[in-house]
Image (spheres, coloured by chain):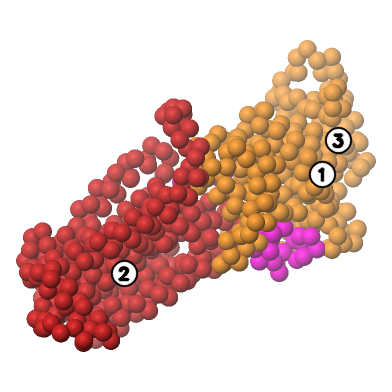
Amino acid sequence: MKMRGITVKDEHIETGQKRAAHKKLTAVVLLLCLSILIPVAIVVGSADLRVLEVCKILLKSLPLVGERFPFPVDPFAQTIILNLRLPRIILSILVGAALSVSGVIFQAFFGNPLAEPYVLGTSAGAALGVALAFFFKFSSAPLSAFFGALGATVLVYGFSRVGKKVPITVLLLSGIALGSLLSAVTSLLMLLHKEEHLKVLIFTMGGFPTGDWSKVTGILPYLCVGAIIVLLHLRDLDLLLLGEEKAHQLGVDLPQLQIILVFSASLLVAAAVSASGIIGFVGLMVPHLMRLIVGPEHKSLFPLSALAGGVFLLAADTVGRTVFSPLELPVGIITALTGAPFFLYLLRRKRGSGLF
Amino acid sequence: MKPTRSQARKKRIRWDTEGVIVSDVQTGYGRKIVLRAINLTVRIGGFLGLLGPNGSGKSTLLKAIIKYLPVSAGRIALLGNDLSTLTPKDIARQVGVVPQKLETKFELTVRELVTLGRYPHLTPLSHGDTEDGRIVEESMAAVNILHLSDRLITEISGGEFQRAIVAQALAQTPQILILDEPTTHLDISHQIDLCELLLKLNREKGLTIITALHDLNLAARYCQEVVLLKDGKIFASGPTDDLLSEALLEEVYGVRVRKERDPFTGKPYFLYYAQKTEAPHQPGAANYPQNLQEDIEIIEEKT
């Protein structure tokens, strides 16, 4: 502040008021983005469908009134739209929201803006859960993913806790080490299972090649339970930003809250990973940008991060499946292409300001 | 040498009427025991200073009082309630804490920070009503930071941030305020401001204040009573002016101390010298060993 001079200081006098205005504006802009992106994502793709045709199919498939429209539709196109593109769109929004929100939770939990399910190894734990479910013919992949995510998070937390503190360097290093260990096991399991190599690749890179309605309904309960639990503890998350000791001084029951948060974050990550494999950095970038705009208070940060995460992943996935069409880029590649440099930038920028 | 301990044994402790009662408490970090056999009582409306060298256990004791550290033996009561029966939220409704230093990487505004002080009074779904808003405003006004309310906490000065933390503690509407060396990172003007504020809160609102301090002169000027800790035990305790003698401070801190009296406030103040140094240009310096002997005798008579 002192270095940047008086003009900046004046600007920040109004930070409080500016944030209040930004909250509404951001919500409106994000909803607008979503309402433009969804139709675009329905129309574009490797199967060349015309806008008119798409409209007809959508009208035709409306419940109750749909049957009354007289025009015929192409059943092939109808299948593509209703059973491939639409569930994929919804899935990418849900996964984006879940990843972004779990980033918000981990960042408050560890008191550090660099914490994120991919970096911490939680996603890798969930992926191992999915692979094990696959291997042992266990029916519920999300449940198995949940235990994987929970286990990985508890392990990383246990590893990196020194006394009452979690040094961020130790946290990141143990998260990355555990993450690559678990990923290696996952890849091994999947290869042993003689799955197609492409499928393994897409799963570890993260993507939605097999988006269908059963996946949406499969992860929805996990998302809802996880989100509702966190929604009831938004203010507790605010307090964690001040450090564990201050949070206790203000009345937070720390052990209880930590269990609740790890539990709900694991639910969210499990839902995301079992639907789409490992997608990194969404939980890092989105909350960070939202925090810049609306501040760290979770009452606004949480819903806006969810919304922005959905928009971001839908956009990334739509780009991924259209730019090199008919070849599909796994969405994880796109988030890593944007997210990893962002992570490095944060690491670099924050070092000077006493993050470590 | 330990008046409090014997007092506590002789006097029947009235658990329901005192602000804070610490009785035979032993506590520490994990297996490492830092404090043993701690007895102290702070009456409601009292102003207690906690003194002692670095590592004597001042912060540890304060952490035990708010249940941040578990007590491995003994008992603590807050306003008549046994600490073990209270949840962190119960405690936060009665006790506000100002830590020595608070670090956060997150850019809250001052108002957002102070508003978090209302947490123990709110349920998960309520966002606070106008009454809560009024308390937040009053708390900020009390420490004179209303004009900063929309600024970021990362952009205000250390003294202003410290005041914001005090405001947050006041927003808890506590009956007891605990401070852990609150003046350590402040310049002298902010030190005096903070102490005057504490005195005002203590006198006007009847707030019970317990503060760990390094500065003997601030303690002598503001605290009604002091407790001297050394090596995890209570070395001495009592009314500030009577207790803080040259001999006692020398014994606790291992430096030579001269006690003088401030002509303006009438309160004592202290000058410190290295153990082997002759205090220069002081008329009384030559007689120092004799004074010291008298003081020791006085203390021995008391105990």
Q: Which residue is mark 3?
A: B241
Q: Residue at x 21, y 66 (%)?
A: A39
- The chain painted red is A
Of residues A316 and A19, the one nearer the viewer is: A19
Quadrant showing the C terminus of chain B: top right
Which chain identifier belongs to the orange chain? B
The chain letter under disc 3 is B
- Residue of label 1: B204
Q: Is residue A353 above or below residue A326?
A: above
**Residue B235 picture location, percent across and down:** 78, 45
The residue drawn where x is 81% and y is 48% is B206
Quarter the N terminus of chain B occupies = top right
Which span is picked out in magenta?
A: B76-105
Q: Is residue B57 visible?
A: no
Left or right of A196 in this view: A149? right
**Label 1 packing within 10 angstroms: few (<14), some (14-19), many (20+):** few
Disc 3 residue crowd, few under 14, some 14–19, many 20+, Cα 10 Å: some
Name the kind of residue labelled 1 in the image.
Answer: Glu
Q: Nearer the viewer, mark 3 or mark 2?
A: 2
Q: Is residue B101 left or right of residue A215?
A: right
Q: Which residue is mark 2?
A: A94
Does B282 sit above or below residue A89?
above
* Element at label 3: helix
Q: Kindly state the secondary structure of the residue where label 2 is placed.
A: helix
A315, above or below B228, in the image: below
